[in-house]
Every structure is written in C-alpha cells, then in structure tokens.
Image (cartoon, rainbow, N blue to C red):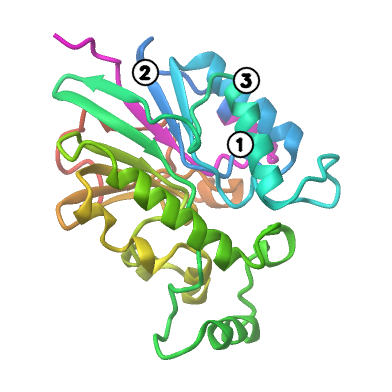
Amino acid sequence: MSQTSGSLLAISDLHVGHEENRRIVDALRPEGENDWLLVAGDVGEMSEDIEWALRTLASNFAKVVWAPGNHELWTPPKDPLRLRGVERYEHLVELCRGLGIVTPEDPYPVWHGPEGPVTVAPLFLLYDYTFRTHAPLSREEALAAAHERGVVCTDEYLLHPDPYESRQAWCEARVRSTEERLGALDPAMPLVLVNHYPLVRAPMDVLRYPDFALWCGTESTADWHRRFPVAAMVYGHLHIPRSTVYDGVPFEEVSVGYPREWQRPGHPRTVPPRRILPATPAGQGER
C-alpha cells in the first residue's frame, strides 16, 4: 500500500512586502505533518522578502512546490539583486533548491494520496498577450487600447525578458519545452498542474478591468487540461480566489492578494491554504 503524504494544500500571491501578509505567512501551518504546500507564485518582489518567505514555508511544510509569478521576476529599482530575466529566474531556482523546494526545473514529484499517486507539476509559462478583449485586434493594437484606458501591468517596466527579445518570445519558449515535458509523462498518471496563470481564458471573464487579461496567460495552453490527465489545475494572479470547473477539471484560484483586497468584508481570501487533494466535498466553492 502506498504511503499517504497528508494533504496537497495550495496558496499564491502572498505579497510579503506588505506587513499584514508577512504575518499571514509567518502563521501558516499544515493540517498534518506530511502536508505539501503548492505555491503558485507572487511570493514577493524584493529578493530578501522572497527568500524569507520561501525559507519560512519550507521550514513548516513537509514539501513545498513553487511556480514563479510575475512579481518574483521583477527587477525593482531598490532591490540589491540586479539580475534580470532568465538570470533572475535561474537565481530563484537555485535559491529554492538550496531550501529543498521543488521548482519547474526539477523532476516532478509524486504525491501518494488515499486514491492513488498523483504527479505534481509546477509550471513556468508566462503570457503572450493572446488573451485579448477583442479578437480582431493585433497584439500591438490591444496593448495600445489598454494603455489608452489606463490599464498597464507593471511587468511592462520591471519584468525584463533578457536574453529573449520580448516576454512573448520567452513565453513561447517556455510553452514549447513544458508541452514536450508533459507529453513525455505516463498518460495513466493523474496530474496536478501548478502555474501562476490559468491555462484557459474563461477565468478572465470576471476581471474588473478586462484589458488586464493581456497579462494573464496564453491561448497556447487552452486545451492542456483536456490533452493531459489533469486532476486539478492550481493558479493565482487574479486575486479572485474561487473554485471553478472547466470540461470536468477543477481549477483552483488560491491567491491571498493585497491587504486592501482581502480585508474587505466578504472577500473569500485563501487563508489558510486551500486543500486540493484529497478533494473537499462538493459545494465548498464556486462550481
């Protein structure tokens, strides 16, 4: 009989540069001693904050699995770590490895639950501006329209794609390599995919500012939850924590978000971490 590894828990968008969020991370604890924590990006922006948060989580959970968000990849002007683009990402990967945290560059771990084993795959895919509000618009036209309406992601100034010519090109390279890797896995083994961005366009339908969808993923992954044996898809980025189902596959948005968001009355913040597996009873989320 396989040994059960507790629960698969998930959280994202911790943004520990905010003191209120830092206290949340400091207080996070597992349900049991064998629980894994899936972190779907945006731990923080400054390198010192990122290291503190990851070290804290790694000390409290049996295993931590991390997928980068856009904020970890920023190069803020006041951050003493001046690495950009791929070099910054690789630095974060080595930081995680030193803490025993699984990254998208490592072998995918297998979690053994009461219903059998599941492969946990952290992904790093970025976005390519194909989530457009008006399909006929070109990427340049869609970005220009968003700028005119005052909707501009800070990535345009702080997330550098070096040595790629653009964030779009970096995304395309990541999608190709990840698709090949997923395709080489055992098709009989269920997958839990962890990515900062959702794989499909549908979650963007609830955005307050629809133009922001440009910075939220890629149409290249629209069928991955059907092509691969996905048991659950974990993501963040939108700061709209909820549970939805697309084509029979649970999609879990597990973000904490900024204090001004989660402190609003009635906000469904993801604290404590959301349990992904074993699955919670039906009806405990927006389905």
Q: Is residue 226 left or right of 136 when viewed as pictured?
A: left
Residue 256, how many percent across, how many down? 50, 43
Q: Is residue 115 left or right of 51 when viewed as pictured?
A: left
Residue at which label 3 appears: 98
> Residue shown at 61%/75% (left/top)?
151
Q: Nearer the viewer, residue 23 or 160?
A: 160
Task: Check whether the beta carbons of the residues at disc 1 and disc 3 lie within 8 A of each other.
Answer: no
Residue 73, how many percent across, how many down? 66, 49
From mark 3 to mark 2, how far is it between C-alphas? 20 Å
Residue 245 in view in this figure: no
Task: Check whether the beta carbons of the residues at disc 1 and disc 2 lie within 8 A of each other.
Answer: no
How many C-alpha atoms fall within 10 Å of the one at disc 3: few (<14), some, or many (≥20)? Answer: few
Determine which quarter of the picture holds residue 122: top left
Height in image: 76 above or below 165?
A: above
Give the structural element (helix, strand or loop) at label 1.
Answer: helix
Q: Is residue 76 left or right of 233 when viewed as pictured?
A: right
Residue at which label 1 appears: 21
Which range is magenta? 1-24
Tag 3: amino acid: Gly
Height in image: 197 above or below 285?
A: below
Residue at which label 2 appears: 35
Which of the two labelled residues, at mark 1 and mark 2, occupies the earlier sequence position? Answer: 1
Task: Check whether the beta carbons of the residues at disc 3 and disc 2 lie within 8 A of each other.
Answer: no
Tag 1: amino acid: Asn
Residue 36, how many percent across, how many down? 39, 22
Q: Quadrant of the N terminus?
A: top left
